[in-house]
């Protein structure tokens, strides 16, 4: 029995062989082709295709390119494994109609997927992805190689990094970086550009592997034991890890301690706004610390809360003047670049931030900044909830909200909607200062996701426990 292709946030991910295979990739490619032809209504449509190091990624990229070509669409196919932001930047800079990245991002090795990128160099918005899905199996698959051009995507991306980063400053301050590419598409890209400028660095797991050398390529603390071990044995300024397609990053202090994404976002916001004087708003997903609102909201700068998912950040970045967009899973986007996550650029900006401070170690910089901003107290948990009323619970809670949670008065609520118009996220603002509970209901798994911020670890735990009571 054939499994149905259902597109998610900005494309499709599936289990290799059983869900995503040569046949289903060709079907998805023809749907994408039909969508583009219908949308562009031009004689010549230009597209770009990139791929990561997963099993069959190159093969799937070729199949996708052949289908586009068979429908008289001009295709630039990357001549090497590349990070997702490299593909996105190429699409935007070359003025192409759209792009496709073959990757399953940080998903386990058993998965692969297809990400759709629009002309602005960011993820497809929900309504456009739905349109692509509507073209599935509308027309027979056409395929040839006549309009495929194998191309170097990295050169113009490197030129962009040269414009955005002060490499002379990094060299003068004698930083020493440790990079963990996690066997993903980041490979030796950071090391190559840093070494070009005589900046000390070393990369571990630099060769892209289909199985990510035995790890899950998500740059979170639990997966970064090799980075931690090498940091503790060496004399580095800090460590940076990039995920499977290098659009997200995680940061470790030079002693091997994890720097949470929440504090990373706070430090980056401070550097971009107060040091680099980048103009524009800040955009954060609702799960990111409200300290951004407390410290960076001014009469001339808003801090926007959007639904969890980088496509919602992208939507704001292409419709408003935005300096920086951030999500708690380590995806960060920057003004004057692309409305897209970029783990490579993020690592370089963190290095520039440290170099500008005059400090050699990231922990020293963090200690100083914690005096200014305080610590971030935050946590999240996933609660299994098998009852059939899972998707009904949040609308019900929104309509009959309690007056207080965990002893804190409920001051307000922000609801977030699924593509079907149902409340699937609810942020409850509690007490004063940075206290909140975010509840999200999975539409595909028997899970309720709970996120909380408070003024102490104990407060956060109490808020989360109170949140669990809504789902007995």
Image: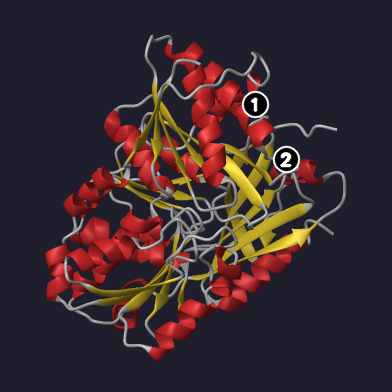
Image-quadrant location for residue 45: top left
Residue ID at (43%, 9%): 41
Q: Is residue 17 left or right of residue 388?
A: left
Q: Position of residue 314 (x, y in %)?
A: 42, 39
| Horizontal arrangement in the rendering, residue 113 relative to residue 158 (left or right) | right
- 16 relative to 94 in the view: left or right: right
Distance from label 1 to label 2 (Cα)?
12 Å
Q: Is residue 411 above or below residue 94?
A: below
- Is residue 21 visible to us here? yes
Mark 1 or 2, nearer chain start: 2
Q: Position of residue 185 (x, y in %)?
A: 45, 55
- According to the image, label 1 marks what residue? 27
The foreground one among 366 and 244 is: 244
Q: Give above or below for 403 relative to 70.
A: below
Disc ID at residue 19? 2
- Residue at image point 66% right, 14% down: 138
């Amino acid at each position: 029995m054939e499994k149905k292709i259902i597109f998610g946030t900005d494309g499709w991910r599936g289990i290799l062989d059983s869900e995503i295979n040569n046949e289903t990739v060709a079907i998805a490619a023809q749907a994408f082709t039909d969508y583009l032809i219908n949308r562009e209504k031009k004689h010549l449509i230009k597209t770009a295709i990139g791929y990561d190091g997963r099993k069959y990624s190159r093969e799937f990229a070729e199949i996708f390119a052949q289908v586009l070509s068979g429908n008289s669409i001009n295709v630039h196919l990357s001549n090497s494994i590349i990070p997702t932001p490299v593909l996105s930047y190429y699409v935007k800079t070359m003025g192409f109609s759209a792009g496709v990245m073959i990757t399953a991002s940080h998903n386990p090795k058993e998965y692969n997927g297809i990400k759709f990128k629009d002309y602005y160099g960011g993820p497809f918005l929900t309504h456009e992805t739905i349109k692509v899905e509507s073209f599935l199996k509308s027309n027979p698959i056409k395929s040839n190689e006549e309009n495929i051009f194998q191309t170097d995507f990295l050169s113009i991306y490197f030129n962009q990094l040269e414009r955005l980063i002060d490499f002379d400053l990094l060299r003068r301050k004698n930083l020493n970086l440790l990079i963990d590419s996690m066997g993903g598409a980041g490979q030796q890209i950071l090391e190559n550009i840093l070494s070009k400028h005589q900046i000390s660095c070393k990369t571990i797991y630099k060769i892209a592997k289909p199985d990510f050398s035995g790890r899950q390529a998500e740059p979170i603390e639990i997966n970064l034991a090799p980075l931690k071990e090498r940091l503790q044995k060496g004399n580095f300024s800090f460590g940076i890890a990039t995920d499977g397609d290098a659009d997200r990053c995680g940061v470790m202090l030079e002693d091997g301690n994890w720097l949470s994404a929440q504090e990373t976002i706070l430090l980056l916001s401070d550097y971009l706004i107060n040091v680099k004087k980048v103009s524009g708003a800040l955009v954060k997903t609702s799960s990111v610390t409200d300290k951004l609102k407390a410290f960076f909201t001014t009469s001339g700068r808003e801090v926007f809360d959007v639904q969890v998912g980088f496509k919602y950040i992208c939507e704001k970045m292409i419709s408003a003047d935005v300096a920086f967009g951030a999500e708690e899973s380590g995806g960060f986007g920057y003004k004057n670049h692309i409305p897209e996550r970029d783990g490579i650029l993020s690592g370089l900006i963190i290095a520039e931030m440290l170099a500008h401070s005059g400090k050699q170690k990231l922990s020293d910089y963090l200690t100083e900044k914690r005096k200014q901003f305080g610590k971030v107290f935050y946590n999240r948990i996933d609660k299994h909830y098998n009852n059939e009323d899972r998707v009904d619970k949040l609308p019900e809670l929104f309509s009959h909200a309690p007056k207080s949670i965990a002893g804190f008065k409920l001051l307000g609520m922000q609801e977030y909607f699924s593509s079907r118009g149902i409340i699937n996220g609810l942020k409850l603002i509690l007490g004063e200062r940075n206290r909140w509970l975010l509840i999200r209901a999975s539409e595909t798994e028997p899970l309720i996701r709970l996120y909380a911020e408070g003024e102490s670890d104990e407060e956060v735990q109490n808020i989360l426990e109170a949140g669990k009571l809504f789902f007995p």
